[in-house]
Image (cartoon, helix red, strand yellow):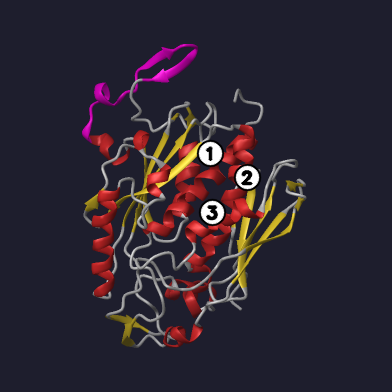
Amino acid sequence: MQGVLIMSSSFGSVFKVSTWGESHGVGVGVVIDGCPAGVALSTEQIQAELNRRRPGQSDIVTPRNEEDKVEILSGVLDGVTLGTPIALSVRNKDHQSAAYNEMQHTYRPSHADYCYDAKYGIRAWAGGGRASARETIGRVAAGAVAKAVAQAICPRLQVIGWVQQVHTVFCHVLPADVDPAVVESNIVRAADPESAEDMSMVIREARAKGDSVGGVVACTVRNCPVGLGDPVFDKLEATLAHAMLSIPACKGFEIGSGFGAPALRGSEHNDPYYMDGDRVRTRTNYSGGVQGGISNGEDINMRLAFKPTATLMVPQNTVNDEHAEVQLRGKGRHDPCVLPRAVPVVEAMAWLVITDHLLRQRSARI
């Protein structure tokens, strides 16, 4: 044993979540600490979000057949939170570990296999263990609880995610015009049906070749109260970036004008204030709803870049745990594009951040 190495699996300050479980273990889940008492919460609310994340939804995602049925183990009585830790559990039922036998000693390109071995000297090789996207079940379940808490405080709060880009195909619907019903009406979760068709075709073509594609998930937070976030290290956008970049396969984050800001002059980029009745508003929203690390009441607009799925069904050069150079062909059941199932994960992480900041800022004017 080379020293004591601790792996963190917790997120949040007041509303704190700790996910647990491996991809091919008995099950996965989450423990939530800091949830207020007296919030209405049902199994159906949590299950509805997990159903949006579950595998096997269509022919463009992994065919792993998991119902992802959630069980509330603690913290809720007669449909109301007790204020005590909430434990949520989902059983793994369709894991086929034999497909990963070769990966027990061989490092998959662009996976966490080598890094886990190098750091810890041990890894759950079947399905990727904690590095698997199956870990996000706990995040989505916790996000459903966070949503219930946040909307109990601010009933008009909304978090809406959608697929904005797959490979080189773009959806050009503006964040303010995105309709969540349209997003959920197509298997890609694009904001318009025409883009969804083109994106589906790209994903199917990649799958047929044993390849994969990445893209962009956009997310907007509507009706966010003024005053969330702190002005230094716990800026709202910094916490959001932390949350989003912790999602498997997420490689980039921007808020508001993001990487487009360098192409603008200050006179073009500034958001002028004006009065809308008794409310202070901005005429533009290049800031993305956050200024000085604090929410200003405008929509919080984010974009997240997701890499192509790393598991490919074609031979790739790699090395094994004896440091011999070998070839490896992917096996098992995988998403040729993570984006459609990433949308509810992105929304969940946004709910976790907003709810945590709401509970930290209960004395603010909300």
Q: Position of residue 306 (x, y in %)?
A: 35, 57
Q: Which quarter of the rendering shows the N terminus?
A: bottom right
C-alpha gap between disc 3 and disc 1:
28 Å
- Pointer 2 residue: 13
- Pointer 3 residue: 49
Extent of the magenta region: 263-282
Q: Position of residue 220 (x, y in %)?
A: 42, 39
Q: Which quarter of the rendering shows the C terminus?
A: top right
- The one nearer the camera, 319 or 248, is 248
Give the crowd class for mark 1: few <14, some 14-19, many >=20 residues within 10 Å. some
| Element type where label 2 sits in the image | loop
**Left or right of 277 on screen, residue 108:** left
- The one nearer the camera, 202 or 211, is 202
Q: Hey, what amino acid is under mark 2?
A: Ser
In the rendered view, tell whether residue 358 sits above or below residue 109.
above
Sequence-wise first label, 1 or 2: 2
**Left or right of 300 on screen, residue 226:** right
Give the crowd class for mark 3: few <14, some 14-19, many >=20 residues within 10 Å. many
Q: Are marks 1 and 2 in contact (CB under 8 Å)?
A: yes
Q: Which mark is residue 234?
A: 1
Sequence-wise first label, 2 or 3: 2
